[in-house]
Every structure is written in C-alpha cells, then in structure tokens.
Image (cartoon, rainbow, N blue to C red):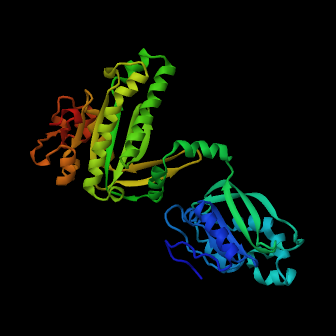
C-alpha cells in the first residue's frame, strides 16, 4: 500500500504498535515503526516531510519489508535516500532481522532486495538484543549533500514481554544541548515559513530593506565591542519585528537587514504589503529602546527603510553546512535596495507598486489613503544616489508617515 500526500499514516492494527506510533508522531520525531516481521507499518509525519525535502510528505509503501525491493525502490526516489543509506541500515540491523526470520538465512535471502544480498554472508542472529545505536550519513539533493545522523533501534514489547515490533528513531549527530540552544532562540512559526520555501519558486512578495544611517561614524565613535553589541541588538529587534508581522527574515549584511512578506503566506497581495509596512513601523518604534540599552541617544540610532513589491521574485531557502537562510532573486530586490539608500533622514520610502497593492481595509488600518498619495520618481528625489539614478530612476515612490504622525 502506498500513501498519497499529505495524509498522515494510518495507525497499525496492533494496539501496542499503534500506541507507539501515535506517541512518536505526537512527539514530532523522525521514526519508523516496524512489525514483528520488519515490515514498515508507520512512518512519522516529520520523517516523511524531511524525506520529501521539506516540500511534501513522501509516499510510504506500508506493509513492505524495510529491506525488501518495494521499500527500497520507493525510498530511492526520496532526495534523502541512497543505496548506501540502506546498506548502512542493514549492516546495523541485519542480525536482528535474521533472528526474527523463521526460515533463517534462506528465507531472508528471498526477502531482501538483491542489492543487499552480498551482506548476508557471515550474518549472525541477535535474538536477545533489546536496543542498538549506530551512526550513518543522511543525505539531501539525491545524495549530493551528506550530513551525520545517529540512529536508535529498540524492540517494542507488549504487556507480556513478547516482542511485537521495532522502532527506528533518527536524530542529528549534533548533541541535543546544541540543538536545544538553536531551538530555544528560534521561532517555530518562522521555521515553518522557512520550510515552506525550501523549494525555490516564483513567489510574489513585499520587500523590506533597512539600514543604519551614519554607521561608519558610529563605529569609529564606539569601541568595537560596544558597536558589535549595538549591531546584535539591531539584528534581534529587526528579526523580531519581521517575525511578529509574519515575514521571512533574509540576510543581514553588516548593520542592514532584508525581509520578505509573501503573498501566499499572508493570504493576499494586500496583506503582504500591509505586514511589510507594519514591520517597518515596528522596527522604527523599537530603535529608541535599542539606543537606550546601548547608552546612546535616540538620534544616534536611525535607520533608512525602503519598501517595494516583487511580482517576479524567485524566493527559496539556501542551506549550507554553515547556515540556512531565505533569499530572493529578481530585479525588484536590487530596486528595493536603491529605494532604501535614498531614504536618508530615517525616512520610509515605499514604491507605488507596493502601496497600490493595499485594499481599502488594509490601507485604512495603516492610516493611509492610496487614492490621495502622490509620488516622485526616485531619480528626482533630492536624496537620490548615483546608483539609484543609474539603476532605478523612474520608480515612483512616496514617503510613508510614522504611526505617531498619523491623524
């Protein structure tokens, strides 16, 4: 039986296996549940989603032997599995499987995938084992990217002590103390939004660029340690404002930040534009507090904001051994940077294309009337830069008022 997406696997018929499967899935773990004959009877949602490259939950051949051709053929279609993955698993668990196979080595020879048959020689049954652990390589992008995993295999027993199945749990090779720190400071909602863009695609979005004004002079004035602390506080404040508004944090370049507010996440173009403006206002409102905690005056910590709309952005997640971040490519990203550079004096400049995405309700909530706003081409601003004149001189922009100045 193969499962379609995105349904959760049905619980196994055996009540003990069903209870175990439900608990593993509720705990959000990467795990398989196998029956007494090592057939796959359950796979948790989190493992299915990870095996689907965070894009979809993979189909599972329920009832197939873990080391049989049906399961291996299905698993090799997942971006996280390779033949070496199966061979490492069989090397660790083969003695258990042999002990649980009534017909011994000959029956096992008829059961396992032909690509594993060479591993049967010298295999000895381990009938009394209760648990084992081994290390393996996880993989992504069809085996092109490898990472370390630890695996815990445990017998599942009923109330009488009889073995009714096996659980196979996977965890990262990084210790839980390290994982716990990363999870503690991260936002679950933002993690989910990052997963939703694991596959890079065209995604219309509002774009926010923000940068600290007078940063060079401030860096010379403060000690290096004090300036670093300021930039860290700014980054944290910026990320929190973006996350609270439902956006995606992009890259941090020095004292600047980039964020994206996807229409598909917000629910509409208007909602994405609104949350982008709300995030910029929230960050502007947080700056005096950042300045005070850094022993500075409010006028010392001023940021420029450039807001734009990207109809043809290609948005996705880039993960490497050193980081995982959301990025976007498209002309509008460069244009947003040019708009921000022209917003000197702590202003917020927004493009006409962004503002006119707002519907009546969202505009009113922001205290704006798009029908009464007038615009100036970026190249005609007194604060325009050479790059803006060169790259985006005709983009119409307006200055958005701060919340405190709204009627």
Residue found at x 16% / y 53%: 360
Residue 337 appears in view: no
Q: In the rendered image of this protein, does residue 42 appear above or below residue 192? A: below
Residue 119 appears in view: yes
Residue found at x 32% / y 27%: 302
Residue found at x 81% / y 74%: 162
Q: In the rendered image of this protein, does residue 188 appear above or below residue 228? A: below
Report the quarter where the N terminus lies. bottom right
| Residue 367, position as x, y percentages in the image | 18, 43
Report the quarter where the C terminus lies. top left
- In this picture, residue 316 sits left or right of residue 49: left
Q: In the rendered image of this protein, does residue 226 appear above or below residue 186? A: above
Which is nearer the eye, 268 or 407?
407
Residue found at x 51% / y 73%: 7
Which is nearer the eye, 145 or 244?
244
Which is nearer the eye, 52 or 79?
52
């Amino acid at each position: 039986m193969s499962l379609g997406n995105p349904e959760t696997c049905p619980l196994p018929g055996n009540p003990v296996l069903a209870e175990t499967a439900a608990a593993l899935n509720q705990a959000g773990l990467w795990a398989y549940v196998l029956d007494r004959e090592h057939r796959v009877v359950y796979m948790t949602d989190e493992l299915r989603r990870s095996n689907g490259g965070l894009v979809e939950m993979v189909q599972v051949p329920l009832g197939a032997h873990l080391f049989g051709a049906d399961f291996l053929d299905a698993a090799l279609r997942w971006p996280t599995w390779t033949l070496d993955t199966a061979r490492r698993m069989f090397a660790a668990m083969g003695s258990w499987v042999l002990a649980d196979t009534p017909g011994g080595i000959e029956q096992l020879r008829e059961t396992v995938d032909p690509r594993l048959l060479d591993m049967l020689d010298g295999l000895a049954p381990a009938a009394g084992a209760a648990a084992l652990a081994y290390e393996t390589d996880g993989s992504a992008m069809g085996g092109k990217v490898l990472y370390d995993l630890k695996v815990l295999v445990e017998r599942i027993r009923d109330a009488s002590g009889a073995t009714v199945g096996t659980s196979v749990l996977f965890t990262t090779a990084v210790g839980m103390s390290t994982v716990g720190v990363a999870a503690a400071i991260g936002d679950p909602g933002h993690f989910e939004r990052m997963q939703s863009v694991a596959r890079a695609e065209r995604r219309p979005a509002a774009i926010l660029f923000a940068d600290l004004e007078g940063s060079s002079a401030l860096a010379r004035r403060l000690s290096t340690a004090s300036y670093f602390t300021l930039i860290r506080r700014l980054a944290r404040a910026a990320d929190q404002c973006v996350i609270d508004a439902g956006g995606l944090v992009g890259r941090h370049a020095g004292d600047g930040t980039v964020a994206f507010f996807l229409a598909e996440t917000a629910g509409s173009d208007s909602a994405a534009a609104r949350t982008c403006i709300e995030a910029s206002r929230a960050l502007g409102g947080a700056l005096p507090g950042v300045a005070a905690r850094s022993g500075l005056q409010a006028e010392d910590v001023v940021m420029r904001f450039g807001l734009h709309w990207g109809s043809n952005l290609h948005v996705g997640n880039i993960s490497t051994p050193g980081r995982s971040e959301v990025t976007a490519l498209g002309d509008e990203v460069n244009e947003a940077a040019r708009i921000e550079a022209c917003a000197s004096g702590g202003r917020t400049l927004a493009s006409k294309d962004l503002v006119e995405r707002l519907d009546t309700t969202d505009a009113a909530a922001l205290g704006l009337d798009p029908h009464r706003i007038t615009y100036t081409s970026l190249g005609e601003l007194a604060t325009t830069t050479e790059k803006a004149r060169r790259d985006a001189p005709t983009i119409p922009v307006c200055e958005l008022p701060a919340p405190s100045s709204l009627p």
